[in-house]
Image (cartoon, rainbow, N blue to C red):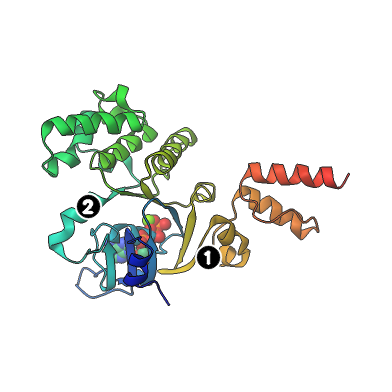
């Protein structure tokens, strides 16, 4: 039985985002419905959580991301953001003040020729008074480590810097939740690190709810919780340890194990049993040296 509103209220926690039997079908150009891209999805995300969404190409991740802030409305079922139905167009602006999205391609998100104007775009559209916009923009740029670049041209920045400016744009809207759809897919390793450490900081230090769509297992392990999608459905929802200990589902959905889990699995197959729950390279190194010490 799923948690009811009553249970949520009793526990004092209204979910920030709730998908209730939510499906989405794109229309073809002729206006006919295609098979659903998202099918009967149920999950809820509480304030402060860091959730990663994994799944192979075409599994419905981006569609789910766009359903979280009313860019797409479910064709069946409901998506509720802080008690508000995303299908109610009158609530769209309020919903976008709670949930902001950063997309994969940094170049597509630049709307201005100066970094600080770019970051100001969101709050300007919300009608925030100029003095407060100034303050929000400065604060957001400092948070993502881009304050010194406030007068630069966004087009001349590196990919990682552009994504951090895009994140600042969402922060300046003061949303409770930031949804990032493969924000590092087009970045080099340095850019990836910059963006991922920024995202982690937003969650841990500022308490911002994070939904990170990614195809990098090593990014997903940083989350508190991982949702795996396959063919429009959720096939797994749990902690990184829970999810990656289900090696069968990981393989069946065309995903890989994170590096530490992969190495531990190989050793296990040759009869060396390291402790459970190894995910990262650091976890593996620690468990392996412990194993060597114990078996001297
Ligand atoms: N604009 C669209 N019109 C029609 N079908 C679409 C559209 N966008 C996505 N789809 C289809 O919906 C399904 C889910 O796509 P979606 O983009 O949500 O997957 P994804 O998991 O984000 O994939 P990727 O890893 O490639 O980004 C796919 O079958 C895709 O072809
Ligand atoms: Mg996608």
Q: Tell me if residue 43 comes above or below residue 105 in the rendering.
A: below
Q: Dot 1: few (<14), some (14–19), or many (≥20) neighbours within 10 Å? A: some
The C terminus: image quadrant: top right
Give the alpha-carbon distance from disc 2 to disc 1, as whole Å: 32 Å
Q: Look at mark 2 in the image and give the residue it sits on.
A: 96
Left/right placement of residue 43 relative to residue 260 reads left
Q: Is residue 225 above or below residue 10?
A: above
Per the image, label 1 sits on a secondary structure element best described as loop
The percent coordinates of residue 231 (x first, y second) are: 43, 69
Report whether residue 231 is seen. Answer: no
Which residue carries the number 1 mark? 253
Location of ligand 2 given as a quarter of the image: bottom left
Give the image quarter of residue 25.
Answer: bottom left
Residue 128, by quadrant, is top left
Q: Is residue 201 left or right of residue 123?
A: right
Q: Position of residue 226 (x, y in %)?
A: 48, 58
Q: Earlier in the sequence, mark 2 or mark 1?
A: 2
Is the residue 262 above or below the residue 116 in the image? below
| Closer to us: 137 or 268 | 137
For the point 33% across and 57% down, the residue is: 65
Q: How many marks?
A: 2
Q: Residue furthest bottom?
A: 1
Label 1 near label 2: C-beta < 8 Å? no
Q: Which numbered circle lies on residue 40?
A: none
2 vs 1, front mark: 2
Image x and y of residue 266, in percent: 72, 55
Residue 1's x, y, as percent?
A: 43, 77
Q: Is residue 174 above or below residue 229?
A: above
Can see residue 32? yes
Task: Identify the element where label 2 is drawn.
Answer: helix
At x 23%, y 60%, the residue is 70
């Amino acid at each position: 039985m799923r948690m009811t509103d009553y249970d949520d209220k009793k526990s004092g926690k209204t979910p920030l985002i709730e998908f209730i039997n939510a499906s989405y079908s794109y229309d073809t150009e002729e206006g006919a419905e295609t098979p659903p891209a998202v099918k009967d999805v149920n999950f809820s995300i509480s304030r402060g959580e860091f959730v990663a969404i994994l799944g192979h190409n075409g599994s419905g991740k981006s569609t789910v991301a766009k359903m979280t802030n009313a860019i797409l409305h479910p064709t069946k079922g409901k998506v509720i953001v802080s008690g508000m139905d995303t299908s109610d167009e009158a609530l769209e602006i309020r919903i976008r003040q709670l949930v902001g999205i950063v997309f994969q391609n940094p170049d597509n998100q630049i709307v201005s020729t100066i970094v600080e104007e770019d970051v100001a775009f969101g709050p300007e559209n919300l009608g925030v008074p100029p003095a407060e916009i100034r303050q929000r923009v400065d604060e957001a740029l400092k948070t993502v480590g881009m304050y010194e670049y406030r007068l630069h041209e966004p087009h001349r920045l590196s990919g990682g810097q552009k994504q951090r400016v895009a994140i600042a744009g969402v922060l300046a809207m003061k949303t409770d939740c930031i949804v990032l759809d493969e924000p590092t897919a087009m970045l080099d390793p340095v850019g990836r690190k910059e963006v991922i450490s920024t995202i982690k900081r937003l969650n841990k230090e500022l308490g911002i709810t994070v939904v990170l769509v990614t195809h990098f297992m090593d990014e997903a392990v940083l989350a508190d919780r991982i949702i795996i999608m396959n063919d429009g459905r959720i096939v797994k929802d749990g902690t990184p340890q829970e999810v990656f200990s289900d090696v069968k589902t990981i393989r069946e959905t065309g995903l890989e194990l994170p590096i530490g889990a992969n190495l531990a699995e190989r050793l296990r197959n040759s009869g060396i049993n390291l402790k459970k729950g190894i995910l990262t390279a650091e976890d593996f190194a620690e468990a392996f040296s412990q194993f060597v010490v114990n078996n001297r």
